[in-house]
């Protein structure tokens, strides 16, 4: 029982990271209408941005959930950096392009290479870390529930939740969400209705890549930082988005949760006696994903038509 | 004719390199309803798209009152009091009816709730389906929604592309009535209609377009009475 | 699309052909002047041809039928593993089979997998198919990686023979091979040159055969139905076309062509490992198809060539750079920028399809505009 | 100057070339002949962290060699990236062997990639191939594929011995899912007499290995054995700390789990007691100390053993050139083993070895003992390698003795 | 009153030789009942009209009989073969082809290519004959091309044959949609508002064309709001209201039926 709880806890942390990545990807997917393969590297970019900023602000006193205040400032800087880069990329690369969504997809592969090249050139390929001490499992939880959860885990989950709620409010409480969906649905008609689609798209890039950056920072905080972390996780993030139903931000959250959990729950299969080794964990996640798609061909939150 | 509120003057326009409109001129008087008729592919929709900034005029000018609007962006044109109902793809399929209507009013300063409520009153067909996604609407219901969406802005000038296409006779009558009502409330209307006799019937003036230019223009009634126009463009009798 | 020059060649095609001709001449010159070693050039030709096959295969799936298949690497890998497992001396299950027999082994394996992957996933649409196929490709890779009792696992397979190794004359050449005419030896070639030359002959035959086959099935009612499916599957269904069957056919044909590339790769590189199934190959092939011009067979070939040119060309480009940036990131950046620029300059690809999918002979009657 | 960006330049006035796909490092006096050999390295892709360290070792080696000279001229290295993939590796080797026609090829990191290069480019030619980093036991099957680090088998056996010595009766083994991990892992399983209660691979480059760690913690193994790379191990050790299971068993590791970065990223004290078996040289050897200080001065950090292997690969190549009659593959392959064999006089630096040869010594008069150890390439192309045991004490590595490979 | 008696309450069933027979079809979308126990029969050789207010369920009925929607209840038979629950292409194989109310846009195809997809069971749609009997393929293809060109000329868009099928005006797209359906030469052709947005002069001509095809043996079931068009062509006319058949009868009788006027035609405009 404690074992399952532990797997669930691991899954929750991992899911939080995946969710941040997948919401951003889903936003871009639905509004700019292409699968953005540079999203993973945007995550990495944000993580490195925060690394540099942490070097500056890391010393700021006080801690929240075991993390120095400076870390949160660095997080914000990383998010801002990713947003700025994404907006610049949009203006310089995507916007002037006269191509379809697959053409954009291919372009985004090119963009991903450029981002990674820059990071690799500036920071090398070796792995790096935020200089924050780990504090080990929270004793209370370990004693009462026999589940090891660190403050850092809690910080990741809480921060992800805060960002997700903020996004939810942004989409629901302002007309922005509706404008985004309208722009995604039919950009010409959106303009006819008076929506300034240019701005909507910029906002989309800002929000999407800032969230991606947050995901990247937490990912780096969780394990470590190298120029490939974002790209390595991109496949999983895509799986989450598609599993959730393309274009549905809430679907992406659900998909992220599911994929993150599946990923961490695979050992359970071994525990209950199935002859499936951990090496097959990604395979199991993918097979389940395909199975879900067969039942719901448009994703969990996608409509059934 | 009253003072022109919309003037299209010597406009060439088209898609990519393909020219569709050829030195086309027409005017819409303040408070008027004018109807554009003509064969398929004559360029009627292209006129509306050019006026509304979806296409940039290659030459010539488009003026709203005295103001040049040729080449202005649609989202800006909306804000100076022009509304447009496209012929196809004219609703947001993945948004609900209510959201569609509200999207029609993003450029409004206020009073959105009131207008929307009023529109539900006027179009009960929509009221029943407020929370349905627009893509589940029948062809005719969709057409009504598209029309209603453009009314949310309460524009001074309304461009409508085939409002009656796909409508049942009774609904078409209602829509034509509504066009007249809106017009009486002060909106000048430029309308494209294949249901030419009905369209001209409620219009003050008419234009017959063929191959990108205006072939005939004049009082709506006189066009209806013109035997040549009838034979070439309007068909035998009223279509409903 | 307005200039449909049926049968003839469009200006764009002539331009590209001219450019390719010039490039070929340049390469030849480079070989003659000793600037480029023949064995290396032949290797590059073989590599390009392999990418041409891959992108032609993907083009059948994506370009003809709009199926977003992200399991290119898996089919490539199956072809490679199929033949390697049968022929290689290091094979854990069999080995020693003649490559020509193994060729069909590789293709058979790919065909079976194409049906297994295709059956559930081809019912999905667009991007859902993409991720499902990507997922299943990963399953294949992970399987090969972990089931080492059958596949040799991560160690990979060594001891793969050359394709012509057991052929009468070609298999018994001695090296350096001396080219005799009337008793005087004209020139001689080292083993690597002969081997590469034979590989190039082999792959040229394969590429030509595949191209001719594809051209016929593409510009036909069959190809037309697929294009309809690509834009609107419902429409094709209402017109009585069994869209699933059509998609399955295209999927299997495309997969077989990819597997063919894999078979060739095995006998070119003589070593296969699970690494060869990494998704990165899939991405490169996608880039090739899009850069070449989706839906055009010639475009796909050109795209395959282009991608090798980008990959290998950047090797040389980085030589000259006196930039304050390492070779590897510089090259990565160049590849990225090249992709961006080609899409920018040629949004529809270098050679987009310009022909209607109408049986060419039936338009021949001069009834044309 | 290697591919790695922050390498900076070698400094002291030689070869000011910046970026290089194929950089030609050379010293200023250029009147004499230049011997160009090839090097395939993982400058990008998943193994690029190794490639980067190799480049540093190579750079120092070139400087050491060219300050003395080789064959009356100087050594240049034509550099290619294998992108950590076999396709990339083969293309890189094709360029070097068939286009630039180098008679000797240093390459490469990944065992699978080295094999691919050997199978498709090098075999049936007389080009000499020396892998700078590949440790897979499988390479032993290719006698003319030489390498600098000892085969992983020796390492696996050494770990097994350590486990026995420390009275561990059961072990949980986590290995990285590639040629290296698989073969070393298998060798360990063969060697270990106790019970193996967990034996699972994991993929490289994952963001989380908590399922692996959780599963290991689920067993009651006395010892946990990690055959994996640094970034993966760093993640695992942190996750183990977060799960509070670091003290559950004694930890052991192969060569590539040890590194300053690992310690740096692990929570203070969490790795205490861990033992790692690392191919190495006696720490106090003079030549190694010189290498370390040179390295630290240039790059601001300690070298890893991988940098040392790359260094020795270059030096051995240079010695072969010096010793051979002519600069051809055939001639080089005749002497390349000899200059490392124990029959001759031990020389611990390039300069010393060069001097023996320059004074008319035959190849077998030299026994180059490099910064990475005695080398002594055998008939299978494997070095004798010395293994060193490190233990983490007070969050620092301490030598706990040597084992001969 | 005599006309009134010609109008049947609900559908006329038990026709002699129905090409299409739909019985008790029901389709719900959530709480909404789009078709509710709808039954219709289309007699071979007729042009049957299907009218009814917007949202009455006409298009839904088409979707049900053509296999696009799975009915919640009821059955469909084409040419006497039960096709309930079959895939659209299987139903088309039985000889029934439909068009869409909103025209489909075949991207990347020219107008005539789009038409050439129409003909059913072309030899060249299988791969093997492309190699074994290219002559047959060529002949078929020539014939279809010729037919397509004629069709386009009749529809007054002959000059658009080699234009991209997506660069068309709204009305032109409807024409292409219609022409493609006709190329299939099925037993029964279902047309969903074929002349909505089509110029009235051309619509008159199309009516003549449909009559010709009908004489050649094609049966039609046509949804259309254009009263002139449908009254001229169709007999009988079926009126659908709120998901089920209100009345069925000859055009003039239907036109003067009070219920139809109430639900559909509306009073004279003021
Ligand atoms: N998106 C487009 N791209 C290229 N050409 C187009 C496009 N849309 C329309 N056309 C062409 O422009 C011409 C005029 O089209 P337009 O839509 O203005 O006609 P219309 O008079 O509105 O016809 P309809 O009554 O059929 O709607 C037609 O010949 C059409 O083929
Ligand atoms: N996919 C769907 N989901 C939900 N409701 C639907 C769906 N399709 C149709 N409906 C509803 O079913 C009813 C019937 O629609 P249908 O399209 O059949 O009408 P119609 O008779 O063709 O009307 P029109 O003449 O306007 O085209 C409408 O109220 C419509 O909103
Ligand atoms: Mg129009
Ligand atoms: Mg309808």
Image (spheres, coloured by chain):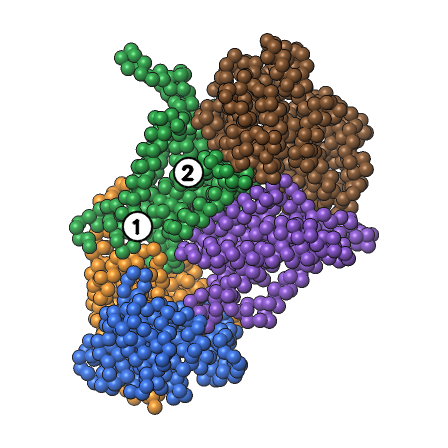
In the rendered view, does B206 fall on the left or right side of E241? left
In the rendered view, does D160 fall on the left or right side of D115? right
Q: Is residue C205 above or below residue D378?
A: below
Q: Nearer the viewer, residue D26 or D138?
A: D26
Please provide percent x and percent y for residue C280: 51, 42
Q: Nearer the viewer, residue E75 or D218?
A: D218
Residues at circles 1 and 2 in contact by the CB criterion of under 8 Å: no
**Colour representing chain B:** blue
Chain of residue at mark 1: C
Please provide percent x and percent y for residue C321: 48, 38
Q: Which chain is purple?
A: A
Mark 2 crowdedness (10 Å alpha carbons): few <14, some 14-19, many ≥20:
some
In the rendered view, does E262 fall on the left or right side of D235? left
Residue C48 shows in the view: yes
Please provide percent x and percent y for residue B1: 29, 87
C-alpha span from label 1 to label 2:
24 Å
Q: Label 2: state its secondary structure.
A: helix
The residue drawn where x is 74% and y is 53% is: A59
**Colour representing chain C:** green
Mark 1 crowdedness (10 Å alpha carbons): few <14, some 14-19, many ≥20:
some
> Dot 1 corresponds to which residue?
C354
Chain of residue at mark 2: C
Q: Which chain is brown?
A: D
Q: Nearer the viewer, residue D222 or D359?
A: D359
Q: Is residue E269 above or below residue D99?
A: below
Q: Nearer the viewer, residue D147 or C272?
A: D147
Please provide percent x and percent y for residue A277: 64, 40
Q: Which chain is orange?
A: E
> Dot 2 corresponds to which residue?
C309
In the rendered view, does E95 fall on the left or right side of C248? left
């Amino acid at each position: 029982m404690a074992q399952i709880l532990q797997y669930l806890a691991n899954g929750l942390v991992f899911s939080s990271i995946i969710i941040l990545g997948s919401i951003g990807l889903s936003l871009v997917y639905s509004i700019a209408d292409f699968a953005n393969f540079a999203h993973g590297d945007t995550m990495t970019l944000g993580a490195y941005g925060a690394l540099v900023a942490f070097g500056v602000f890391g010393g700021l006193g006080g801690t929240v959930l075991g993390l120095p205040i400076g870390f949160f400032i660095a997080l914000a800087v990383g998010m801002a950096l990713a947003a700025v880069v994404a907006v610049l990329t949009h203006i310089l690369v995507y916007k002037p392009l006269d191509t379809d969504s697959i053409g954009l997809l291919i372009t985004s592969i090119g963009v991903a290479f450029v981002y990674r090249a820059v990071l690799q050139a500036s920071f090398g390929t070796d792995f790096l870390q935020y200089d924050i001490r780990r504090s080990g499992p929270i004793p209370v939880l370990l004693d009462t529930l026999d589940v090891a959860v660190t403050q850092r885990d809690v910080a990741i989950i809480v921060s992800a939740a805060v960002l997700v709620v903020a996004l939810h409010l942004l989409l629901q409480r302002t007309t922005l969400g509706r404008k985004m969906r309208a722009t995604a649905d039919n950009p010409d008609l959106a303009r006819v209705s008076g929506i300034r689609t240019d701005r909507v798209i910029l906002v989309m890039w800002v929000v999407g890549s800032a969230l991606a950056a947050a995901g990247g920072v937490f990912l780096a905080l969780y394990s470590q930082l190298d120029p490939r972390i974002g790209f390595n996780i991109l496949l999983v993030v895509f799986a989450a988005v598609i599993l959730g139903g393309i274009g549905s931000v809430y679907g992406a959250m659900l998909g992220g949760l599911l994929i993150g959990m599946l990923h961490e729950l695979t050992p359970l299969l071994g525990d209950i006696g199935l002859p499936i080794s951990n090496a097959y964990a990604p395979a199991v996640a993918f097979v389940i994903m395909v199975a879900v798609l067969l039942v719901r061909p448009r994703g969990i939150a996608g409509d059934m038509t | 004719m009253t003072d022109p509120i919309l003037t299209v003057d010597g406009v060439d326009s088209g898609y990519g390199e393909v020219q569709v409109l050829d030195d086309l001129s027409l005017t819409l008087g303040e408070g008027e309803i004018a109807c554009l008729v003509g064969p398929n592919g004559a360029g009627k929709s292209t006129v509306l798209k050019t006026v509304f900034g979806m296409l940039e005029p290659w030459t010539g000018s488009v003026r709203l009152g005295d103001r040049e609007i040729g080449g202005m962006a649609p989202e800006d044109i909306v804000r100076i009091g022009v509304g447009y109902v496209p012929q196809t793809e004219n609703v947001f399929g993945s948004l609900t009816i209510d959201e569609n209507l509200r999207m029609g009013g993003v450029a409004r300063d206020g009073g959105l709730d009131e207008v929307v409520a009023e529109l539900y009153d006027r179009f009960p067909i929509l009221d029943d389906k407020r929370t349905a996604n627009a893509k589940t609407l029948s062809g005719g219901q969709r057409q009504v929604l598209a029309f209603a969406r453009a009314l949310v802005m309460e524009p001074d000038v309304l461009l409508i592309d085939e409002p009656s296409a796909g409508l049942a006779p009774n609904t078409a009558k209602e829509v034509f009535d509504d066009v007249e009502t809106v017009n009486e409330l002060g909106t000048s209307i430029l309308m494209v209609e294949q249901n030419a006799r009905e369209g001209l019937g409620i219009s003050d003036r008419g234009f017959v377009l063929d191959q990108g230019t205006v072939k005939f223009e004049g009082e709506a009634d006189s066009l209806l009475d013109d035997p040549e126009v009838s034979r070439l463009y309007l068909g035998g009798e009223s279509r409903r | 699309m307005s200039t449909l020059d049926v049968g003839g060649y469009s200006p764009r095609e002539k331009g590209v052909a001219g450019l390719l001709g010039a490039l070929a001449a340049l390469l030849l010159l480079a070989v003659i002047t000793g600037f480029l070693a023949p064995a290396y050039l032949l290797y590059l030709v073989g590599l390009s041809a392999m990418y041409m096959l891959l992108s032609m295969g993907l083009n059948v799936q994506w370009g003809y039928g709009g199926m977003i298949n992200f399991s290119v690497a898996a089919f490539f890998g199956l072809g490679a593993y199929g033949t390697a497992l049968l022929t290689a001396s290091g094979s854990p299950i069999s080995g020693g089979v003649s490559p020509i027999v193994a060729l069909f082994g590789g293709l058979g394996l790919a065909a079976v997998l194409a049906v297994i992957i295709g059956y559930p996933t081809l019912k999905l649409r667009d991007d859902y198919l993409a991720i499902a196929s990507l997922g299943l490709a990963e399953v294949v890779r992970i399987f090969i990686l972990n089931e080492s009792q059958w596949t040799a696992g991560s160690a990979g397979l060594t001891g793969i023979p050359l394709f012509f190794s057991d052929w009468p004359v070609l298999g018994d050449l001695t090296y350096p091979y001396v080219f005799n005419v009337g008793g005087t030896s004209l020139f001689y070639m080292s083993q690597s040159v002969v081997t590469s030359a034979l590989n190039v002959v082999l792959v040229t035959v394969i590429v030509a055969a595949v191209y001719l086959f594809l051209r016929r099935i593409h510009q036909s009612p069959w190809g037309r139905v697929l294009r309809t499916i690509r834009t609107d599957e419902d429409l094709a269904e209402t017109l009585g076309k069994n869209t699933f069957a059509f998609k399955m056919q295209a999927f299997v044909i495309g997969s077989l062509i990819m597997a063919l590339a894999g078979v060739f790769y095995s006998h070119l590189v003589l070593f296969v490992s699970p690494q060869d199934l990494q998704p990165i190959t899939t991405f490169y092939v996608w880039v090739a198809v899009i850069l070449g011009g989706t839906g055009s067979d010639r475009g796909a070939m050109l795209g395959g060539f282009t991608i090798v040119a980008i990959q290998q060309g950047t090797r040389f480009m980085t030589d000259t750079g006196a930039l304050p940036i390492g070779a590897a990131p510089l090259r990565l950046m160049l590849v990225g920028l090249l992709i961006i620029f080609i899409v920018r300059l040629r949004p529809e690809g270098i050679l987009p399809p310009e022909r209607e999918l109408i049986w060419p002979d039936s338009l021949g009657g001069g009834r044309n505009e | 100057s290697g591919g790695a960006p922050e390498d900076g330049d070698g400094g002291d006035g030689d070869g000011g070339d910046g970026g290089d796909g194929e950089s030609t490092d050379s010293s200023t006096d250029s009147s004499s002949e230049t011997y160009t050999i090839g090097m395939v390295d993982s400058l990008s892709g998943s193994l690029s962290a190794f490639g980067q360290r190799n480049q540093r070792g190579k750079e120092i080696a070139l400087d050491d060699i060219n300050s003395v000279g080789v064959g009356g001229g100087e050594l240049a290295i034509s550099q290619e990236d294998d992108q950590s993939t076999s396709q990339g590796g083969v293309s890189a080797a094709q360029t070097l062997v068939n286009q630039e026609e180098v008679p000797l090829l240093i390459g490469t990191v990944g065992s699978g990639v080295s094999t691919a290069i050997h199978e498709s480019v090098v075999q049936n030619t007389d080009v000499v191939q020396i892998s700078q980093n590949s440790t897979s036991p499988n390479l032993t099957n290719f006698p003319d594929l030489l390498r600098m680090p000892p085969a992983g088998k020796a390492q696996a056996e050494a770990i097994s011995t350590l486990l026995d010595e420390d009275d561990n009766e059961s072990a949980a083994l986590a290995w990285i899912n590639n040629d290296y991990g698989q073969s070393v892992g298998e060798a360990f399983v063969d060697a270990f007499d106790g019970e193996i209660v967990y034996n699972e691979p994991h993929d490289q480059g994952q963001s989380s290995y908590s399922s692996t760690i959780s599963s290991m913690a689920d067993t009651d193994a006395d010892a946990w054995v990690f055959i994996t790379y640094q970034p993966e191990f760093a993640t695992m050790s942190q996750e183990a700390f977060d799960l509070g299971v670091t003290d559950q068993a004694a930890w052991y590791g192969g060569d590539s789990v040890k590194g300053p970065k690992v310690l740096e990223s692990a929570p203070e004290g969490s790795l205490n007691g861990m033992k790692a078996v690392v191919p190495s040289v006696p720490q106090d050897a003079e030549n190694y100390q010189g290498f370390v200080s040179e390295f630290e001065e240039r790059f601001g950090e300690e070298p890893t053993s991988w940098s040392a292997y790359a260094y020795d690969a270059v030096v051995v190549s240079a010695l072969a050139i010096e010793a051979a009659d002519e600069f051809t593959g055939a001639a080089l392959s005749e002497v390349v083993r000899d200059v490392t064999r124990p029959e001759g006089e031990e020389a611990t630096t390039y300069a010393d070895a060069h001097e023996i040869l320059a004074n008319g010594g035959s190849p077998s008069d030299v026994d180059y003992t490099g910064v990475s150890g005695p080398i002594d390439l055998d008939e299978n192309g494997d070095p004798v390698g010395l293994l060193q045991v490190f233990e983490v004490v007070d969050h620092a590595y301490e030598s706990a003795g040597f084992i001969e490979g | 009153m005599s006309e009134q008696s010609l109008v049947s309450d609900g559908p006329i069933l038990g026709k002699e030789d129905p090409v299409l027979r739909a019985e008790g079809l029901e389709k719900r979308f959530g709480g909404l009942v789009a078709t509710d126990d709808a039954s219709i029969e289309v007699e071979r050789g007729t042009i049957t009209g299907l009218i009814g207010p917007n949202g009455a369920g006409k298009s839904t009925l088409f979707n049900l009989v053509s296999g696009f929607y799975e009915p919640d209840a009821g059955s469909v038979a084409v040419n006497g073969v039960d096709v309930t629950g079959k895939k659209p292409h299987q139903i088309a194989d039985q000889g029934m082809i439909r068009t869409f109310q909103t025209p489909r846009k075949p991207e990347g195809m020219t107008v005539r290519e789009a038409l050439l997809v129409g003909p059913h069971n072309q030899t060249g749609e299988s791969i093997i004959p492309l190699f074994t009997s290219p002559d047959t393929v060529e002949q078929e293809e020539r014939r279809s091309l010729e037919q397509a060109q004629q069709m386009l000329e009749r529809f007054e868009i002959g000059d658009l044959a080699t234009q991209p099928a997506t660069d068309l005006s709204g009305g032109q797209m409807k024409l292409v949609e219609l022409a493609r359906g006709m190329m299939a030469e099925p037993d029964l052709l279902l047309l969903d508002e074929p002349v909505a947005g089509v110029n009235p002069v051309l619509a008159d001509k199309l009516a003549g064309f449909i009559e010709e095809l009908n004489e050649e043996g094609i049966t039609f079931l046509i949804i259309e709001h254009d009263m002139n068009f449908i009254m001229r062509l169709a007999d009988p006319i079926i009126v659908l209201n709120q998901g089920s058949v209100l009345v069925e009868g000859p055009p003039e009788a239907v036109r003067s039926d009070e219920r139809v006027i109430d639900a559909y035609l509306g009073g004279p405009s003021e």
